[in-house]
Image (cartoon, rainbow, N blue to C red):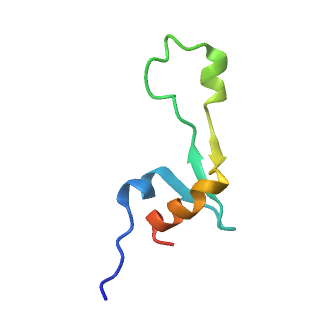
Amino acid sequence: MPKNKSHSGAGKRFKVTGSGKILREKAGKRHNLEKKPSKVTRRMTGTVELAKADVPRAKKLLGR
């Protein structure tokens, strides 16, 4: 049986920690930033843990 290929796009979007948690960047900080309040853009910085419901799908895409 052939090897499974990991999803190259998912590899760029998610980071796996040493304990196995999956981190993601917050959405909405790419464009139209002039319209958004500074409070909102600050809230969108940093990384957060992936939602529990999305973890199995992300792990499958990452080949884990």
Give the vertical position of 25 relative to 45 (above or below): below
* Left or right: 27 in relation to 53: left
Q: Would you place residue 8 above or below residue 1 in this image?
A: above
Name the residue: 44% across, 17% down. 32
Q: Is residue 45 above or below residue 40?
A: below
In this view, the residue farthest toward the right is 19
Q: Residue at x 58, y 55 (%)?
A: 54
Q: Residue furthest left?
A: 2
Residue at horizontal 51%, vertical 72%?
Answer: 64
Residue 26 occupies quadrant: top right
Image quarter of residue 43: top right
Task: Give the residue furthest to the bottom.
Answer: 1
Residue 51, percent from left and from top? 64, 50
The picture places residue 50, in percent across and down from the top left corner, at 62, 51
Return the x and y of residue 58 as percentages of the image width and height. Answer: 51, 60
- The residue lying toward the viewer, choosing from 30 and 2, is 2
- Does 10 sit above or below residue 63? above
Q: Is residue 50 left or right of residue 35?
A: right
x and y percentages locating residue 24 in the rendered image:
57, 48
Q: How many marks?
A: 0
Q: Is residue 64 shown left or right of residue 20? A: left
Quadrant (top left/top right/bottom left/bottom right) for the N terminus: bottom left
